[in-house]
Structures are given as C-alpha cells and as structure tokens.
Image (tube, grey):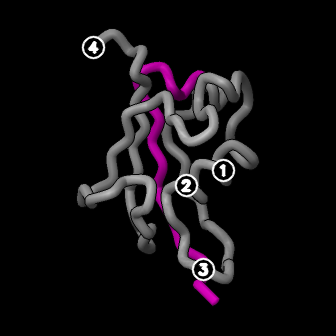
Amino acid sequence: MAAPIAVHLEFGGGAELLFNGVKEHHVTLPSQSEPWDMKQLLVWIQRNLLKERPELFVQGDSVYFSFGLFPEPQGELEYQLQDQDNVVFISTLHGG
C-alpha cells in the first residue's frame, strides 16, 4: 500500500478561476494500493478541488493546461508523484 503523500499544487494564467480564484493548494493525497501518478492526480483534482467548468480543465485524457513538475520528469501523465512534489498548472489560454 502506498503511503499518503503531500503535494503542492499551483494554478496560474487564469486556471485559478476554476478553483475559486485560489492559486495555491497544499494537499495530502490519501493512501492507495498503487503509487499516485499524474493521471490519478487529475481525477483527484476534478473530484476534490475543481469548483466550476470541468470541461475547461480535463476532457478524457486531454489536459487543457500546460503543467510542470519540478524537477521535470519524463512521461508527464505516467509520472509517479513523490512526497513534497510541486505541480504547476498554467492555462494554455493565458495569452502569454
């Protein structure tokens, strides 16, 4: 069983508007049978943090945001999250 992990999430470029204008979230993901990966994190975010317009966040396996993990891994959606990871989501519609 994978232990709970703490993750720092940041939303910018307008993405924070989907989360009541809150740009930073410090969350603890619960224990589960397999390690957390980005795909599972996206589902968790939709179910637990997203406040409006889910179609602007994720649709199927498509993410409407550029996201970064620091340090930057290979295979972003399959990346297994580590305790204390920082994940940053920037809207692809931010105009910059």
Front tag of 1 and 4: 1
For residue 35, which quarter of the picture? Answer: bottom right
Q: Which residue corresponds to the image point at 75% horizontal and 47% vertical from the top-left?
A: 47
Is 7 contained in the magenta span? yes
In the picture of the structure, the residue carrying the numbered disc 4 is: 96
Range drawn in magenta: 1-17
Report the disc number at residue 34. Answer: 3
Amino acid bearing label 1: Val
- Residues marked 3 and 1 touching at CB (< 8 Å): no
Dot 2, how many residues are within 10 Å of its Cα: few (below 14), some (14-19), or many (20+)? some
Specify which label sits upstream in the sequence, 1 or 4.
Answer: 1
> Which type of secondary structure does the marked residue at label 4 adopt?
loop
In the picture of the structure, the residue carrying the numbered disc 2 is: 39
Report the disc number at residue 43. Answer: 1
* Position of residue 18 measured from the top left corner of the image (x, y, whole percent): 63, 26
Mark 2 and mark 4: Cα distance apart in space? 26 Å
Front tag of 3 and 4: 3
- 52 left or right of 92 in image: right
